[in-house]
Image (cartoon, helix red, strand yellow):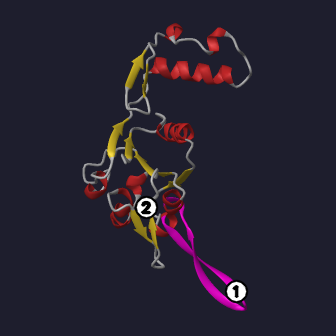
């Protein structure tokens, strides 16, 4: 299980690529946009009060990480580096060979085969802070997304503009040559053969 950490500046397609890959894999996507105020309860599970036979009862509702582990599906933690270090570390057991997380009510959630986690973050320019806590970073394969060059950005914008209005003109599905863009594709087959082309 190769969980992925994607870094890159805003607007380079980190979130969109996770949405596309989960769709290709046919897996449900469970997301959490993180901030410094995000707690483990927002990600793992949170308590709710209900009334059963006249008595108040506390039960726990699974958050996006627990749901992805149980189904199995894809957990996507956007802006993951904004989580406090102790919250980042608390999630480690779900991303390594242990493949479980303990909820606050004592229930242990085990990941089913097929569970996949992706986190993303915008690299910090602050030399006094880290992007990810070291023990968290070690549990992911890291992918770096570069800022798009202006010609490619123009090509993508052009394709989006034409694809939304039903226009089937060649310019809406062109190869990118009119923008000076040389496109290539890459892929991997189920039996782990790599393919590439232009």
At x 53% / y 19%, what residue is drawn? 154
Magenta segment includes 51: yes
Residue that label 1 marks:
52
Q: Is residue 72 above or below residue 188?
A: below
Asked whether residue 22 appears in the rendered view, the answer is yes
Determine which quarter of the picture holds residue 142: top left
Q: Can you give x and y, in whole percent of width and height, for residue 113 in the image? A: 45, 53
Q: Which residues are magenta?
A: 44-65
Prevailing secondary structure class for the magenta stretch in the rendered image: strand
Q: Is residue 50 above or below residue 179?
A: below
Report the residue that reaches farthest toward the bottom: 54
Determine which quarter of the picture holds residue 85: bottom left
Q: Find numbered disc 2 in the image and state the secondary structure of the residue it sits on.
A: loop
Q: CA distance from mark 1 to mark 2?
A: 35 Å
Which of the two discs, 1 and 2, sits closer to the camera? 1
At x 46% / y 57%, what residue is drawn? 112
Q: Can you give x and y, in whole percent of width and height, for residue 60 in the image? A: 56, 75
Side (left or right) of 91 relative to 47: left
Q: Can you give x and y, in whole percent of width and height, for residue 181 in the image? A: 46, 13
182, 194: nearer the viewer: 194
Magenta segment includes 108: no
73, 38: nearer the viewer: 73
Mark 1 touching mark 2, by CB under 8 A?
A: no
Residue that label 2 marks:
36
At x 54% / y 64%, what residue is drawn? 63
Q: Residues within 10 Å of mark 1 (few under 14, many from 20)?
A: few
Where is the C terminus found, in terms of image quarters?
top left
Q: Find numbered disc 1 in the image and state the secondary structure of the residue it sits on.
A: strand
Q: Is residue 84 above or below residue 1?
A: below
Q: Is residue 74 above or below residue 20?
A: below
Side (left or right) of 1 relative to 35: left
């Amino acid at each position: 299980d190769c969980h992925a950490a994607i870094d890159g500046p805003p607007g380079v397609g980190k979130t969109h690529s996770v949405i596309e890959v989960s769709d290709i894999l046919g897996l449900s996507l469970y997301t959490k946009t993180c901030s410094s105020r995000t707690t483990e309860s927002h990600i793992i599970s949170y308590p709710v009060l209900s009334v059963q036979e006249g008595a108040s009862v506390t039960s726990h509702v699974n958050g996006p990480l627990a749901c992805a582990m149980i189904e199995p599906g894809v957990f996507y933690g956007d802006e993951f580096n904004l989580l406090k270090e102790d919250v980042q570390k608390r999630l480690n057991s779900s991303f390594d060979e242990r493949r479980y997380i303990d909820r606050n009510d004592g229930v242990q959630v085990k990941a089913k085969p097929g569970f996949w986690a992706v986190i993303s973050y915008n690299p910090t320019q602050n030399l006094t802070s880290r992007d990810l806590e070291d023990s968290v970073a070690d549990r992911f394969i890291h992918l770096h997304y570069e800022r798009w060059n202006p010609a490619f950005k123009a090509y993508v914008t052009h394709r989006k503009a034409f694809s939304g209005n039903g226009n089937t003109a060649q310019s809406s599905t062109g190869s990118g040559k009119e923008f000076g863009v040389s496109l290539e594709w890459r892929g991997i087959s189920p039996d782990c053969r790599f393919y590439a082309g232009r």
